[in-house]
Image (tube, rainbow, N blue to C red):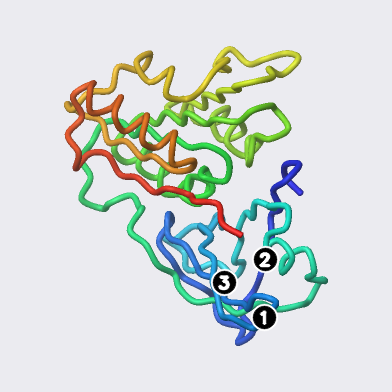
Amino acid sequence: MIAPTVAHLSFVRDDGQPLDFIPGQFIQIHFEYADGTATKRSYSLATIHDHAIGPGEAVDIAVSYVPGGAATALFEGLALGDGVRASGPFGRFCLMPQDTNRRYLLIGTGTGVTPYRAMLPLLERAIAERGIEVVLLMGARAPDELVYGDDFRAFADTHPNFRFVPCFSRELPANPHADVRHGYVQQFLAEFAPSADGDIAYLCGNPNMVDAAFDALKDAGLPVPLIRREKYVSSK
């Protein structure tokens, strides 16, 4: 458990092969409801590996546990060594090789930051090769709900061009970092002066946040093609 209601789960393929993917993509887990009806859920890949070397072995995902949820029951019932059926990878919520921007604004809430964790090696390379800047605005209610916060803080501490800005809507940490903010992520977008001249924004997580931040970025002058978004809709 990496947050009170979020589990980090790691799988390997049963055929021993790696799952190569583009950071930002997701897989679908297939299972059945209690009445036997087939269903599926989508989960962004959280795996960090260096795609220049080759595909990694682990298939990491973050799962939000929902009381009474069918998928929650599936994952909570897994023991070490158990398997699930999955397909993928899918999706286009990815960093584009043709991007020539000077800065990425990455905005996420809850498990919506999962794809940004997988993007860290590519962001590291873009910082080194293109000198880009990255701002990650991450929303959570309280410090214990900051999914992968330690990974992002460690990355920011070793990469001056990467700024990690946790935004807590309810409770602040005891000794907050200078970049910690009190409120919702969309409240602090203006602080970073989004601009069509050099910025590309990514939005992922709670649909209300995605919509509010999308509107704020458009109002700031970012054209729609420079705003890439993915909504996480909770379902049972």
The residue lying toward the viewer, choosing from 76 and 19, is 76
Amino acid at pointer 1: Asp
Q: Where is residue 101 in the image (x, y as percent from the top left)?
A: 23, 36
Distance from disc 1 to disc 3, alpha carbons, whole Å, reads 18 Å
Q: How crowded is mark 1: few (under 14 residues within 10 Å), some or many (20 or more)?
A: few
How much space separates mark 2 and mark 3, taking CA atoms?
12 Å
Amino acid, disc 3: Ile
Quarter holding residue 83 = bottom right
Asked whether, in this view, residue 210 is left or right of residue 73, the answer is: left
Q: Which of marks 2 and 1 is nearer the N terminus?
A: 1
- Is 119 above or below relative to 154? below
- Residue sitting at x 60%, y 31%: 140
The residue at 19%/43% (across/down) is: 225
Q: In which quarter of the image is residue 146?
A: top right
Q: How far apart are marks 2 and 1 (CA)?
A: 11 Å
Q: Which residue lies furthest to the front in this view?
A: 35
Q: Which residue is drawn at 17% across and 34% down?
A: 223
Which residue is label 1 attached to? Answer: 35
Q: Which of 24 and 3 is in front in this view?
A: 3
| Residue 73, position as x, y percentages in the image | 74, 65
Tell me the tag on residue 29: 3
Task: Identify whether 56 is placed above or below 176.
Answer: below
Q: In which quarter of the image is residue 189?
A: top left
* Residue located beneath label 2 in the image: 70
Work out whether 26 lies above or below 172: below
Mark closest to the chain's N terminus, 2 or 3? 3
* Residue 226 location (% of width, % of height): 22, 39
Q: Is residue 7 left or right of residue 160?
A: right
- Labelled disc at residue 183: none
Contact, mark 1 vs mark 3 (Cβ under 8 Å)? no
